[in-house]
C-alpha cells in the first residue's frame, strides 16, 4: 500500500497558486518525498523531491513540515497545462534505486 | 532531464499471441528499471524490477511466466506479455534512474489492446 494520503481532487483558477497537500505520517528518517504528475495517457513526469528541507525548482516548490509527517507542493502560477493527476510518493531504496509506489494521487483541475 | 523511451507507443494484438514492449534509456545507463501497469482511471501499479544481467524481481501477485522481463543491456529492458488475453489490455510504463538514489524518469507508456 502507498504510504501517503492525498485529497482525491482539487480545483484551482488559472494564474493562482495551487497548493497540493500530502500526509506521510509513517515516513522514516532516510526516506525522500517525491512528487510526480501524470497528464492523461502519458508517463509520469518528475516535479521535485526533498528529504527535510524545503526545495524549489523551475516547476514548483516543496514545503516539508519540521516533523516530516506532511508536505505541500506549490505550483506558484497554475496554467491550464498543469491539469493532471499529482502523486506524492515516499520512496525507499530497492537495490540502490528508488522504488516508487504510487497511491491514488490528487486530480488537479485548473480552470480559466 | 534524462530520457526514457518506450516502443511501441500503442499495439493491438490478437488473443493468445505474445507482445514485446521495449524500454530504453537514451542518454544514460540503467542497471535497474521498473515496469508498471495502469488500468483506466486507476493509479500505476508496480509489476517488477528489471535488473541488468540477472533475473527480474516481481511484485506479489504478478505472474512471472506471463510477463517475461529481459534486461540484456545497460540501456534496454523488454517486457513480453505472453499468451495475451483481453484482461491484459492496459497501459504499460517503464522507469529508470541515471544514478542511485535520484529521481526516476518514465517512458511515455505503451497502450496494449488485446482483441
Image (cartoon, rainbow, N blue to C red):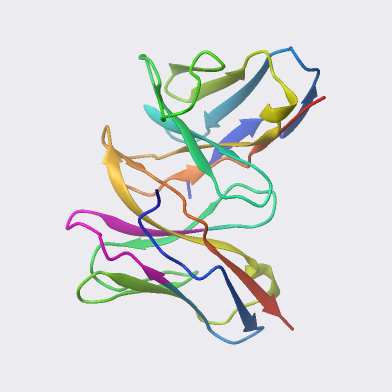
How many circles with numbers are drawn on the protein? 0
Question: Which residue is located at x 50 percent, y 71 percent?
Answer: A7
Q: Is residue A25 magenta?
A: yes
Front one among B8 and A104: A104
Does the segment drawn in magenta span residue A24?
yes
Pick the front one: B49 or A96: B49
Residue for point 60% across, 24% down: B22
Q: Is residue B66 visible?
A: yes
Direction from residue B3 to residue A32 in the image, left or right: left
Q: Which residues are magenta?
A: A22-36
Could you tell me residue B35's position as x and y percent?
A: 50, 33
- Tell me where residue A102 appears, x and y as whole percent: 46, 50
Corner quadrant of residue A66 = bottom left
Residue B101 at least partly seen? no
Q: Horizontal and vertical percent for residue A35? A: 44, 60
The answer to whether residue B22 is above or below residue A64 is above
Q: Residue at x 38, y 15 (%)?
A: B55
> Observer-nearest residue: B31 or A51?
A51
Image-quadrant location for residue B44: top right
What residue is drawn where x is 49% and y is 26%?
B62
Q: Judge from the rendering whether residue B55 lies leftward or rightward of residue A64; answer left or right.
A: right
* Picture quarter with the C terminus of chain B: top right
Amino acid at each position: 500500500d502507498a504510504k501517503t494520503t492525498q485529497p482525491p481532487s482539487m480545483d484551482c483558477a488559472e494564474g493562482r497558486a495551487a497548493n497540493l497537500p500530502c500526509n506521510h505520517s509513517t515516513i522514516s528518517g532516510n526516506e525522500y518525498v517525491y512528487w510526480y504528475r501524470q497528464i492523461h495517457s502519458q508517463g509520469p513526469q518528475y516535479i521535485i523531491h526533498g528529504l527535510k528541507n524545503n526545495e524549489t525548482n523551475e516547476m514548483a516548490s516543496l514545503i516539508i513540515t519540521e516533523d516530516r509527517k506532511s508536505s505541500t507542493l506549490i505550483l506558484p502560477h497554475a496554467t491550464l497545462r498543469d491539469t493532471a493527476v499529482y502523486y506524492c510518493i515516499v520512496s525507499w531504496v530497492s537495490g540502490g534505486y528508488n522504488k516508487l509506489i504510487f497511491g491514488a494521487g490528487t486530480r488537479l483541475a485548473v480552470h480559466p | 532531464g534524462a530520457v526514457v523511451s518506450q516502443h511501441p507507443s500503442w499495439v493491438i494484438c490478437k488473443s493468445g499471441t505474445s507482445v514485446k514492449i521495449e524500454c530504453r534509456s537514451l542518454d544514460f545507463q540503467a542497471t535497474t528499471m521498473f515496469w508498471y501497469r495502469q488500468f483506466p482511471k486507476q493509479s500505476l501499479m508496480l509489476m517488477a524490477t528489471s535488473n541488468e544481467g540477472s533475473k527480474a524481481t516481481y511484485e506479489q501477485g504478478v505472474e512471472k511466466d506471463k510477463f517475461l522481463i529481459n534486461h540484456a543491456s545497460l540501456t534496454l529492458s523488454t517486457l513480453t506479455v505472453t499468451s495475451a488475453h483481453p484482461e491484459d489490455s492496459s497501459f504499460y510504463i517503464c522507469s529508470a534512474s541515471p544514478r542511485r538514489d535520484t529521481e526516476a524518469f518514465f517512458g511515455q507508456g505503451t497502450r496494449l489492446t488485446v482483441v
